[in-house]
Image: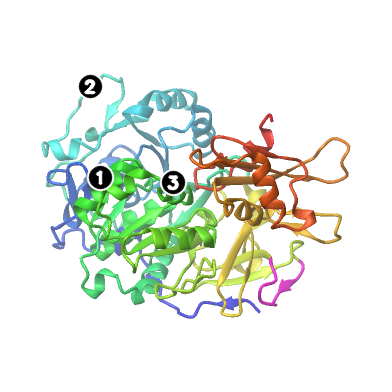
Amino acid sequence: MPLHSKKTVPVPHTSVPSFVFGSSPTASLPDEPIILDAERPEDRYLTLQSYRRWSQRLAAGLRRDGLENGDRVLFIAGNDVAWPVVFMGVLMAGGSLSGCSPALPESALQRMADGLEPKHIIASAEAIEKAKNVANTLGRVDEVILFDGEDIFLTNEVPGDVEDAAGVRPWRELLAFEGEPFDWTPYASSPDQIAAINYTSGSTGFSKGAVVTHGNILANAVQYLKHQEEDPWSFERGHPVLWLSWVPFYHVVGQNQFCVICPKRGLPNYIMPKFDLDKMLAHTEKYKPAHWYLMPPLLITMLSHPAVRKYDITSIRNVMVGGAPLRQSVIERFEHFMPHEDCRVIQGWGMTELTCVAVNRHPLDRSSCGTVGELLPNVEGKIMTLDGHAEVTEPYKPGEIYIRAPSVTQGYWKQEEKTKEMWLPEGWLRTGDFGHFDELERLYVSDRIQDVVVLKSPAGAYVLPTDLESALVNIPGVVDAGVTSILVPGASEKRLRGFVALDRSVKLTREDVVRAYEAKVKEHERLTAGLFVIDTVPKVPNGKVDRASLREMVV
């Protein structure tokens, strides 16, 4: 039988703007800063009131400019205090947003735009030339808009025709008059409307666009809010909780947590344009946030970085970690490493296809067991055999993780066959992740199914690269590790190959690592295709080991 979450919560039957701001377009809202520029919080910030007002002005301008319900907007920009305004403005206007990194190669942008056929392309200055080139192939040069978040903090003047040196339209041209009323409810009221088409990390090939409705976002938001009710460091318990965020807003975590959930809760969030360790530490000392969100590679980097001890980071109580499984040994090291004895590393697990997170450690769970947590409210989960023919009901016995929840997205944009492979009848999503539940119904995620190595000998045995990477990283002097499988000429099955990055201050040779590793593992887990020392282990954007790059390395 599928496992059910221990809690349920009703999902509002409304739109994202109405959930965050209420259904009235003119009601008075709190006017304290909630979205702030970490470098210039004095003059670059949004309150809930101004967040709604600027979003309404953009929405009115988009409708005036021809955006209709169901139209798509491609937004190419990094973090900025005004980023949420574009997100919410597009939703208010009845459109859907696809956000992406300005560093994305033009070829990837082209693939995305070809599928989306966006009505508008909005891009920051660093990506504007790529955006123009992409627009040229679509015949939409007039629809390229230059995004500059500074505009809304420099002037409150009436928008007008402004020529820009880049030869594109400044986004302030889209902003409606300051006093022009805009009611979004005629355009954005149904939870079934598409709010976003969020692209996956591409760890299984080309990025795919997951279709996310307003209802999906709200389902995920209330799941998370209900789950956090017992957090002793929640804002609702009277603590002065702040967030410091560098997670990209075009990522589902940035989009949901910092454009929707934090504003809804009234949590102040200091925004960094991108991750910079020294600035992160300095801002932590200055603003004293209670929460960080770290990808596994960043957490591992901090353990050995000399700058960390130069700053006061005692305010940090919760370190949220997601994107890739984190080894329990690393979690324990980091919790001992942090200066406050109550600081916790809280793993979570989710996917773009699930809107965001679906499983999270319980706020009071202090066990050291490597779990990513329990099912969030309204979520069901089960483990299936790899052929999909039978459910695995025995605790600790692994298989493919399946999830059913109101936050499961609607499928991949214009990819019907791929959608049929993962979105199954009766609402189940095949996640492609390999894992198991324990007797307490907590989930453990081991690896991607595609990375599990099934062996002919011993018959039926399988190897998880993440387990072998953990064995390597636990060798003193090994900073990071990656394991993949390759087909060696003349071999009847794939063989294992490992890569390690070493601490240069430790005297350690490749042969030392091999001896230490082979003393820990079984015969069939040996790296028969070799172990190689490299400077850094390549990662995909979500922090997982880039096994495709490892397989292609010339060694």
Which residue is the site of mark 3? 301
Query: 404 or 395: nearer the eye?
Result: 395
Q: Callout 1, which amino acid?
A: Val
**Which mark is on residue 388?**
none
The residue under label 2 is: 163
Q: CA distance from mark 1 to mark 2?
A: 24 Å
**Image coordinates for residue 247, horizontal then vertical, percent:** 38, 48
**How far from the left and from the top, in percent, is residue 14?**
36, 65
Q: Which residue is mark 1?
A: 81
Three-letter amino acid code of the residue under disc 2: Glu
Q: Is residue 116 left or right of residue 173?
A: right
Quarter of the picture containing the N terminus is: bottom right
Q: Nearer the viewer, mark 1 or mark 2?
A: 1
Looking at the magenta stretch, what is its main secondary structure?
A: loop
Looking at the rendering, in which quadrant would you find the C terminus? top right
- Magenta region: 389-398
Asked if 364 appears above or below 334 in the picture, the reply is: below
- Answer with the quarter of the image where residue 241 lies: bottom left
**Residue 418 percent coordinates (x, y):** 65, 49
Q: Residue at x 71, y 54 (%)?
A: 452
Quarter of the image where one finds residue 548: top right
Question: In the picture shown, does residue 19 fall above or below 523?
Answer: below
**Secondary structure type for disc 2:** loop
- Contact? badges 3 and 2 (CB < 8 Å): no
Is residue 134 shown above or below 239?
above
Q: Secondary structure at mark 3?
A: helix
